[in-house]
Image: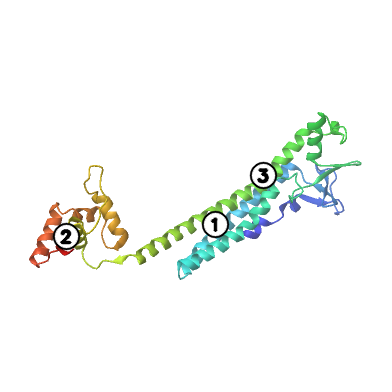
Amino acid sequence: MQKALIKDYYKQFIFSINDEGIDFSMDANQIIYRGESYFEKDLDLIKKNSKHIIDDIKPLYINALSEIILKLSTLNNNIEKLNFLNYSIQLFNIPVNQLKKDFFIDEESSRYYAKFELGDDIFSFNDIYKELIQTQQSKKYKYDFLNFNFFIYRTKILSFLPFSLLTIVKNFINILNKKVIEIEEEIEINETKESKLKWNGKASHLGFLIGQLAELDYINTPKRNNGEINYTHFAKEVLTTFHAKTTESTLTKYLNIATEKAQETQRNFEKANFSIPHKKEVS
């Protein structure tokens, strides 16, 4: 697909004036392309060929995406997947840079850039346009004998293909970039889990013990505007330190020692003769 995107398709729209069997009755324009004389095909034919080229690239797009997804499934870890995706993105950025230039067909950096040959005159659309802007007429290039609308139509037809190819490859890269973001987020989540303390007890144990430490002034807790403990934020802070098999909403019920669940857990600890002295008693 990368080769198809970066291919110089303008060469399919022109043919040398030295080719044998040229039908001079057909509607073709004589141009100068890279210093040589050529005939440019009829614009409606170029338009038709451009659509065929895009149709041919569609299955290549699907196959390339399938190959990348399949390759990702065979890689051992997220770092390898990121390296592969970033390499693929760099590979497809090569046609992006060229297609951006190709879109502006009246710039010499475009592979679609050509000048027209009419008698002794050789000119581009830009030559005529600049003269019209400056003098409101185009005597130098005998513009009176040319149809200005033709150049507008030609620009529209020739720029269609590089613009379409650019859209295709940028959409493809966007899909890869989204996959990169997903993997980076997964790496971040895994690193966060690894940096936490693993809690081997139940969620009720964690909530009760931390709640008791808060009640006995061993821990500062997040407060609401009215001075009461914000147990939702408290649970979130606890879970940033401990990796436990529970949710914030569940842990909240055990952190608040006034809830029925927390009191039930407290009774179980008291049966085991468990108690924590107030901070002041051991200071």
Evaluate if marks 1 and 3 touch, with contact meaning CB atoms under 8 Å apart.
no
Across the whole image, how many numbered discs are drawn on residues?
A: 3
Q: Which residue is mark 2?
A: 280
Numbered mark located on residue 30 in the image: none
The answer to whether 64 appears left or right of 43 in the picture is left
Distance in Å between CA atoms under marks 2 and 3:
79 Å
Q: Secondary structure at mark 1?
A: helix
Q: Which residue is mark 1?
A: 62
Point out residue 191 in the picture as x, y percentages from the top left corner.
Answer: 39, 64
Judged by depth in the image, the label closer to the viewer, 1 or 2, is 2
Are the residues flagged by discs 2 and 3 in contact, CB closer than 8 Å?
no
- Could you tell me which secondary element the residue under label 2 belongs to? helix
CA gap between label 1 and label 3 equals: 22 Å
Pointer 2 or 3: first along the chain: 3
Say which amino acid is labelled 3: Phe
Crowd class of label 1 (few under 14; some 14 to 19; many from 20; radius 10 Å): few
Residue drawn at x 33%, y 65% is: 196
Which three-letter amino acid code belongs to the residue tagged 2? Lys
Q: Amino acid at mark 1?
A: Ile
Give the SS element for disc 3.
helix
| Quadrant in which the N terminus is drawn | bottom right
Pointer 1 or 2: first along the chain:
1
Please state the horizontal and vertical placement of residue 100, each as a whole percent of the image. 66, 49
> Residue 41: x and y, percent?
77, 46
